[in-house]
Image (tube, rainbow, N blue to C red):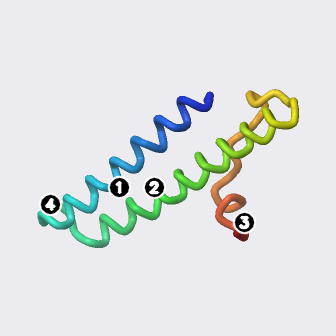
């Protein structure tokens, strides 16, 4: 995935998040469904942001950004700020 594809995926997930919140407010889904899907979206977003950071770092240091890989969710989730 290149940078534009990653950013497009992030945008789509943010839109999904808004739609979930809207569906909950309208009573189309229950809160447990919303929470489960939001948790999944958050994990995927973290992976996308991590991949984007990897690509940018590789570019900055003269490496091939296409060598960046999606890391497992537990690894990404374990990072400290």
As measured in the structure, the alpha-carbon distance from the residue carrying label 3 to the one carrying label 4 is 35 Å
Residue closer to the observer: 51 or 27: 51
Residue closer to the observer: 59 or 78: 59
Residue 18 lies, in percent from the top left, at: 30, 55
As measured in the structure, the alpha-carbon distance from the residue carrying label 4 to the one carrying label 1 is 14 Å
Q: Badges 1 and 2: C-beta atoms under 8 Å apart?
A: yes
Secondary structure beneath disc 2? helix
Secondary structure beneath disc 3? loop
Residue that badge 2 annotates: 41
Q: Earlier in the sequence, mark 2 or mark 3?
A: 2
Q: Earlier in the sequence, mark 1 or mark 2?
A: 1
Looking at the image, residue 80 lies above or below residue 49: below
**Res. 36 image quadrant:** bottom left
Residue that badge 1 annotates: 17
Residue at horizontal 40 percent and vertical 62 percent from the top: 38
Q: Earlier in the sequence, mark 3 or mark 1?
A: 1
Residue that badge 3 annotates: 79
Q: Badges 4 and 1: C-beta atoms under 8 Å apart?
A: no
Residue 31 lies, in percent from the top left, at: 27, 72
Residue at horizontal 34 percent and vertical 49 percent from the top: 16
Q: Earlier in the sequence, mark 4 or mark 1?
A: 1
Residue that badge 4 annotates: 28
As measured in the structure, the alpha-carbon distance from the residue carrying label 1 to the one carrying label 2 is 7 Å
Which of the two marks, 3 or 4, is nearer to us in this view? 3
């Amino acid at each position: 995935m290149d940078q534009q594809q990653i950013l497009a995926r992030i945008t789509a997930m943010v839109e999904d998040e808004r739609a979930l919140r809207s569906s909950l407010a309208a009573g189309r889904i229950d809160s447990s469904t919303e929470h489960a899907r939001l948790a999944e979206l958050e994990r995927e977003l973290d992976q996308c942001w991590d991949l984007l950071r990897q690509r940018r770092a590789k570019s900055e240091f003269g490496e091939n950004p296409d060598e960046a890989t999606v890391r497992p969710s537990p690894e990404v989730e374990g990072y400290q700020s």
